[in-house]
Amino acid sequence: MEIRNQTMDEERALYGILDALVASCVFDGPKDGESALKECRNVQVDNCFFNLRYPFWHVENAGISGCEMTEKCRAALWYDNGVRIENTKLHGIKALRECENVSLRACDISSTEFLWKCRNVEVTDSKMESEYPFFECGDVNIDRLVMKGKYSFQYTENVRISNSVLDTKDAFWHAKTSWLRTAW
């Protein structure tokens, strides 16, 4: 199934779709609907604009590329498994929570509470601004991240960071087994 060049603002606009490509769509409008792609499986979302809440909840196996999620796109990805995010702007509060098997590459992140309670996460070639990033995350691999934050990596476990710049304070409280390598 392919869905292209559409504007959607209704509640659960593409709820439960399977094996689909969603390209060049806009999720915004006066109906102010939420949960556009809730409970979807095997979806590729390319070059879309999200200005509504909770677009990707309980999603399995998704690719998100070249998208923009605005400040109004709060709690964008929750309870997801197997999500690859590339070249995407994640600018809403609470962008990822309780997700597993997530990779972020070349992303621009501005999210107060980013990546909370997530497992098996890779972050590469990205920039981030967040007050509380990586809270209670486990099995995290970070390479080439430029981050400005506060209260970073609290209660984390098995975090590997290489070739990165971390401008943060009060970091790694109660963290277990973290590795830092800075040969950038």
Image (spheres, helix red, strand yellow):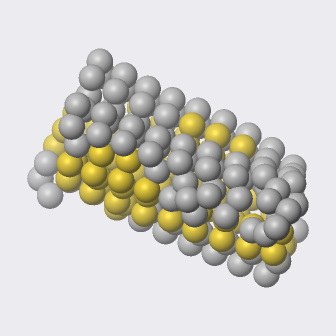
In the depicted structure, whether residue 108 falls above or below residue 41: below
- Residue 168's spot in the image, x, y percent? 22, 43
* Left-right relation of 25 to 126: right
Name of the residue lying farthest toward the left: 183
Name of the residue lying farthest toward the bottom: 5
Residue 41 in sight? no
Picture quadrant where residue 46 is located: bottom right
- Say which quadrant the C terminus sits in: bottom left
- Say which quadrant the N terminus sits in: bottom right
Question: How many numbered circles are shown?
Answer: 0
Residue name at image x 43 percent, y 56 percent: 110
- Residue 120's spot in the image, x, y percent? 48, 36
Viewer-side residue, 150 vs 97: 150
* Left-right relation of 182 to 141: left
- Residue 25's spot in the image, x, y percent? 75, 74
Residue name at image x 46 percent, y 41 percent: 113
Viewer-side residue, 5 vs 142: 5
Residue name at image x 55 percent, y 59 percent: 71
* Left-right relation of 60 to 31: left
- Residue 108's spot in the image, x, y percent? 43, 63
Residue name at image x 21 percent, y 37 percent: 169
Viewer-side residue, 105 vs 50: 50
Residue 98 in sight? yes
